[in-house]
Image (cartoon, rainbow, N blue to C red):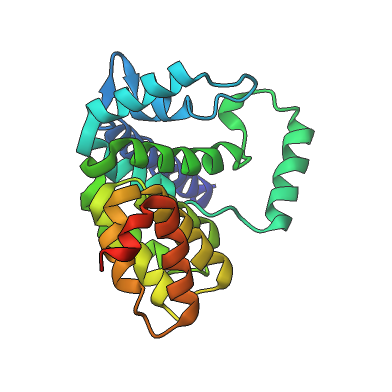
Amino acid sequence: MGKWRVYAGVLVLGLGVAVLVYCMFSSHEPAYEGRSLSEWVGRYSPGQYTITRAQVEETDAAVRHMGADAVPFLMTWIRYERPGMWKRRLYHILEHVTGGRSRKWMISDVERAARAMNATYALRALGPQAAGAARELTRLLNDEKRYNTAMRAANALGGIGNAGVLPLVSVLTNEQSSEEFTAVAAFHLESMGTNAVGALQALLTNDEPAVRRLARNALLKIDPEALNRR
């Protein structure tokens, strides 16, 4: 009986510490107009209804108001990788058994996966305010084994201004990059517009024909005259 009391005490103590840590960290999450960062970010994927352009602009403005304070949280959320298929099936079965009675006790990772993608949108909304995350985003970008995280990192780098140009260019020049990943990097460079022109011009003389082709195609979409200004 004594052992069970000890085990129960340790369990209660562990749960208490977990709750305390959760409260400490969640209380530091930035907020704006009475809503926490996670609540604002959740508006990017509202679930059953379609978010309007006005709501996107309102959410972007709120994220920009929270500024650099939001970046550490967004960088934590963007790293999320979905578990293997067997775990997702197990989640589905368990939620079916419990009847999804309480949202609080749901173990599905759908919300975490959505929040990871939404963190990408928020980083893009921050633009240059998120430039300080460029180094960590670059590290995530270069880890193609964590495919979803790497894709989200590429997306975010394409929206934070000048700090995102060179990391995306490095994907184009990396011989180990997959064709799909290279195409994604080129797409996001195109989306950066004139910010990427100088770096793309430099790639026009790259040793690899494929890199030169990607750079040329991107410039044709961004600034065709740049092809003659070398």
Q: Examine the rendering and report whether any part of residue 193 can be seen.
A: yes
Name the outermost residue toward the top.
Answer: 33
Q: Nearer the viewer, residue 121 or 194?
A: 194
Say if 132 sits above or below 205 in the image. Answer: above
> Residue at coordinates 44% horizontally, 24% vertically from top-left?
56
Q: Is residue 66 left or right of residue 113?
A: left
Query: Whole-percent x and y of residue 92?
Result: 74, 41
> Which one is in front, 81 or 93?
81
Residue farthest along the bottom direction in this orientation: 207
User: Measured from the top left, where is residue 65 in percent x and y?
Assistant: 23, 25
Q: Residue at x 52, y 18 (%)?
A: 52
The answer to whether residue 146 is seen in the rendering is: no
**Up/down of 28 relative to 130, above or below:** above
Q: Residue at x 34, y 73 (%)?
A: 203
Q: Nearer the viewer, residue 77 or 44?
A: 44
Indicate left or right for 185 with 27 as reference.
Answer: right
Q: Residue at x 74, y 31 (%)?
A: 98
- The answer to whether residue 195 is above or below residue 118 is below
Q: Quadrant of residue 64?
A: top left
* Picture quarter with the C terminus: bottom left
**Vertical order, 107 against 165 (above or below):** above
Specify whether 96 is left or right of 103: right
- Residue 96 percent location from the top left of the image: 78, 34
Tally of numbered tags: 0
Q: Position of residue 87 (x, y in %)?
A: 68, 53
